[in-house]
Image (cartoon, coloured by chain):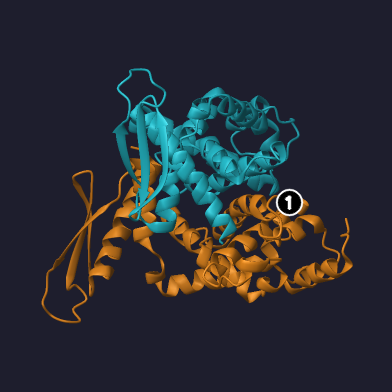
Chain colours: A cyan, B orange
């Protein structure tokens, strides 16, 4: 399938090249064009629906990558890391690496809106993943260039687990399963500044204490408590005993 | 690939037949076996990791189905309907239709736990989807039998939109974007019993009124207000103006 506007076609081919995909890759060009068209250009023919597909595509790509690469990791770790890999922040970073802004058709007011740029880039990036997936109905045009980024990110996360936001992960879980937010109760348990256990945080859910964690700051203690509670939650759910 | 225990192999082949897949389907049998093995049988070799994959697979299958089948629907409708299609309740129903309980290896205490059965069946069902996806790295072994169920469910939902839980959808959205829950303010605006506009609900978020809806009950009014707020939220996000 080739595209009507030769200049746009050239531009899209350049992007495919940048992604490291072969020239003869079976890309459905009209879909890729749509993925890089903002709603300000057309209220109907824009990236919104492809973004909806792409949101599932990136999730599957990340899941498959983690499963293949780290067969020994717990499902709790998988979930927490996948959350980072598919976050708007990560997707916008990747979009930036490939200079996606340059390929995105946007008009007028939206083009000058720098505040909305991160979410716009993340959305368009998801839409591109949707278009590439729908070109072959496999991840063949997605994983070859996405995997190295996932590899680097997951290595970074392993080296600095504080990048994993267990509070967010726990909140999502309690929302999904109990329709409530976890409650944090924090106390200063040591007066010594710099003490790694200066603060003690507890996670409470439905009137029960789920976990406890300590840290040098309130935030660190909450994250430690959230991690324990989240891993417990995932475990309980999976064994369903 | 064939499986070591001929009786288990026969059993799994029967399931594949029940799903309506051809006998010569390229199923990776050890993966399917794993998908139907509960953690009480083996703490390490069980369905947990495949469920993690399957959760993304069913999401992608539902997204692709909706995109292909209802090209004119809004992304807001897509999101709300996908939420129903991939819910534990739906997945457990489908698992029941295929009598998945009969194929699931569970031991001792868990087997008698009827309360955990719904989530166990939904989890195993997701794991089966994971195993079938990983057998070919496409949705070829998933969509042929899953699509008719999605078709029926989405038709039912269209006929009875009350099945769409916009309160849940809105809550998920505000959580993801603002880390807060939407607030509902409900008033009885008519004393007439049975009046379709007896109650008026408002959705408030961060000190602002987002939407308003009416209904014959508090719950109906809240759902109406949630629907407007959710569609507004999705729209705002997508145009990012």
Residue at figure coordinates x 29%, y 54% from the top left: B229
Quarter placement of the C terminus of chain B? top left
Within the image, what quadrant is residue B151 found in?
Answer: bottom right
Q: Say left or right for A136 vs A130.
A: right
Q: From this view, report whether residue A214 is shown above or below residue B124.
A: above
Q: Is residue A30 visible?
A: no
> In which quarter of the view is residue B158 placed?
bottom left
What is the residue that sits farthest to the top in this orientation?
A193
Q: Nearer the viewer, residue A94 or A202?
A: A202
What secondary structure is marked by label 1? helix
Does residue B87 appear to the left or right of B2 in the view shown?
left
Subunit ID for the residue under disc 1? B
Residue A153: % across, % down: 58, 28
One can see residue A238 in this view: yes
Q: Which residue is mark 1?
A: B134
Q: Is residue A65 above or below residue A178?
A: above
Q: Residue at x 50, y 59 (%)?
A: B82
Residue nearest the observer in this picture, A205 or B180: A205
Tell me where residue A28 appears, x and y as whole percent: 66, 43
* Residue ranking furthest to the bottom: B193
Quadrant of the rendering where the N terminus of chain B is positioned: bottom right
**Nearest the eye: B15 or B105:** B105
Q: How many marks?
A: 1
Residue at horizontal 79 percent and vertical 67 percent from the top: B12
Q: Is residue A181 left or right of residue A124?
A: left
Q: Position of residue B225 (x, y in %)?
A: 26, 60
Q: Nearer the viewer, residue B18 or A146?
A: B18
């Amino acid at each position: 399938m080739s595209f009507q506007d030769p200049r746009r076609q050239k531009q899209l081919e350049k992007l495919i090249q940048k992604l490291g995909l072969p020239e003869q890759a079976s890309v459905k060009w009209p879909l890729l064009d749509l993925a890089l068209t903002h709603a300000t250009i057309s209220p109907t023919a824009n990236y919104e629906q492809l973004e909806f597909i792409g949101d599932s595509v990136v999730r599957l790509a990340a899941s498959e990558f983690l499963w293949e690469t780290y067969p020994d990791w717990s499902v709790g770790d998988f979930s927490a890391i996948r959350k980072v890999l598919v976050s708007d922040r990560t997707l916008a970073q990747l979009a930036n690496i490939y200079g996606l802004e340059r390929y995105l058709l946007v008009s007028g007011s939206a083009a000058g809106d720098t505040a909305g740029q991160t979410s716009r880039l993340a959305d368009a990036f998801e839409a591109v993943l949707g278009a590439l997936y729908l070109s072959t109905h496999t991840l063949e045009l997605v994983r070859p260039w996405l995997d190295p980024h996932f590899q680097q990110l997951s290595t970074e996360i392993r080296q600095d687990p504080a990048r994993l936001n267990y509070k967010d992960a726990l909140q999502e879980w309690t929302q999904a399963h109990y329709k409530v937010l976890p409650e944090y109760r924090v106390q200063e348990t040591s007066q010594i500044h710099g003490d790694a256990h200066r603060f003690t945080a507890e996670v409470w859910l439905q009137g029960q204490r789920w976990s406890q964690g300590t840290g040098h700051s309130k935030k660190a203690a909450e994250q430690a408590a959230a991690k324990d509670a989240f891993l417990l939650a995932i475990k309980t759910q999976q064994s369903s005993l």
